[in-house]
Image: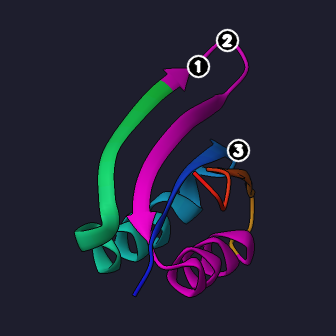
């Protein structure tokens, strides 16, 4: 199955959702290329970037689960389809 590279940018505003977020990321760990988390106490948030290499349907499932979490927002950037 063809895979795509994507970067998921996540901003965590509610610390109560972090445990569930980590469980979701653990579930998709086989697709994660790298992860960087940066706490930003001045604004009371954490910023996380996740690089993945996975089928489109898997990336969509992962971002869908993240999008349902309270106090967490995310955006995804994909590699070009023809790349």
Name the residue located 63 percent from the left edge and 43 percent from the top edge: 9
Quarter of the figure with the N terminus: bottom left
Asked where in the image residue 56 lies, by quadrant, the reply is: bottom right
Asked where in the image residue 59 lies, by quadrant, the reply is: bottom right
Q: Residue 4, image x and y in percent?
A: 51, 64
Disc number at residue 32? Answer: none
Q: Residue 36, image x and y in percent?
A: 39, 33
* Nearer-N-terminus badge (1/3): 3
Q: Is 59 contained in the magenta span? A: yes
Per the image, the residue denoted by label 2 is 42
Per the image, the residue denoted by label 3 is 13
- Secondary element at tag 3: loop
Q: Nearer the viewer, residue 31 or 67?
A: 31
69 lies above or below 16: below
Disc number at residue 40? Answer: 1
Q: Nearer the viewer, residue 69 or 1?
A: 1
Callout 2–callout 3 Cβ contact below 8 Å: no
**Which residue occupies the extreme front position in the image?**
82
Callout 1–callout 2 Cβ contact below 8 Å: yes
Name the residue located 67 percent from the left edge and 11 percent from the top edge: 42
Asked where in the image residue 60 lies, by quadrant, the reply is: bottom right
What's drawn in magenta, residue-wise? 39-68
Name the residue located 70 percent from the left edge and 44 percent from the top edge: 13
* Nearer-N-terminus badge (2/3): 3
Q: Is 55 contained in the magenta span? A: yes
**Which residue occupies the extreme left position in the image?**
30
């Amino acid at each position: 199955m063809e895979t795509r590279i994507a970067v998921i940018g996540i901003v965590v505003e509610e610390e109560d959702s972090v445990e569930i977020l980590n469980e979701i990321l653990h579930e998709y760990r086989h697709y994660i290329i790298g992860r960087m988390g940066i706490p930003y106490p001045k604004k009371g948030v954490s910023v996380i970037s996740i690089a993945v290499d996975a089928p489109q349907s898997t990336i969509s499932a992962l971002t869908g689960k993240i999008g349902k979490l309270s106090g967490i927002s995310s955006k995804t950037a994909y590699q070009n389809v023809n790349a």
